[in-house]
Amino acid sequence: MAYVGMFIFVLAGVVYFLEPEVNYSSRDKVKALGMVMLLWSFMFYGYCRELEFTKSGSSPASLQCMDCIEGTEWYSLAFKALLATFKILAVFAFLYAIKRI
């Protein structure tokens, strides 16, 4: 599954280099911000599931992972999700810099 995700990620980078330059409107920028927030929420949920699996040894297909998180763990999970999101955005920023140079 990880290889499929990386293939999609690399394919998106290749398509980005092949498309012509586009001027984005403010509506497009708001949509991009929404996508970043959605990406962060998926990362946060994934880290919550990972923590639940390490605590209980199982990970059911429901939102029960939110019940096993203690009050002090929310900040570290949110920070880990933020770092993971910034890593992905850094790759896109690098692609943008390469295309502009």
Image (cartoon, grey):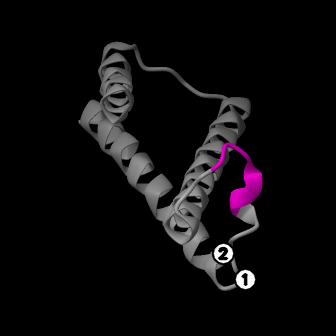
Q: Residues within 10 Å of mark 1 (few under 14, many from 20)?
A: few
Q: Which residue is mark 2?
A: 74
Q: Nearer the viewer, residue 3 or 87?
A: 3
Image position, residue 99 (x, y; %): 29, 31
Q: In the rendered image, which quarter is residue 67 located in?
A: bottom right
Q: What residue lies at 67% left-to-right and 30% top-to-bottom?
A: 28
Q: Nearer the viewer, residue 29 or 48?
A: 48
Give the alpha-carbon distance from disc 2 to disc 1, as whole Å: 6 Å
- Residues at discs 2 and 1 in contact (Cβ within 8 Å): yes
**Is residue 57 rendered to the left or right of residue 4?**
right
Q: In the rendered image, which quarter is residue 71 located in?
A: bottom right
**Residue 11 to residue 69: above or below:** above
Image position, residue 64 (x, y; %): 74, 57
Q: Nearer the viewer, residue 37 or 47?
A: 47
Image position, residue 12 (x, y; %): 38, 23
Give the secondary structure at mark 2. Answer: helix
Q: Which residues are magenta?
A: 60-65
**Residue 77 to residue 29: above or below:** below
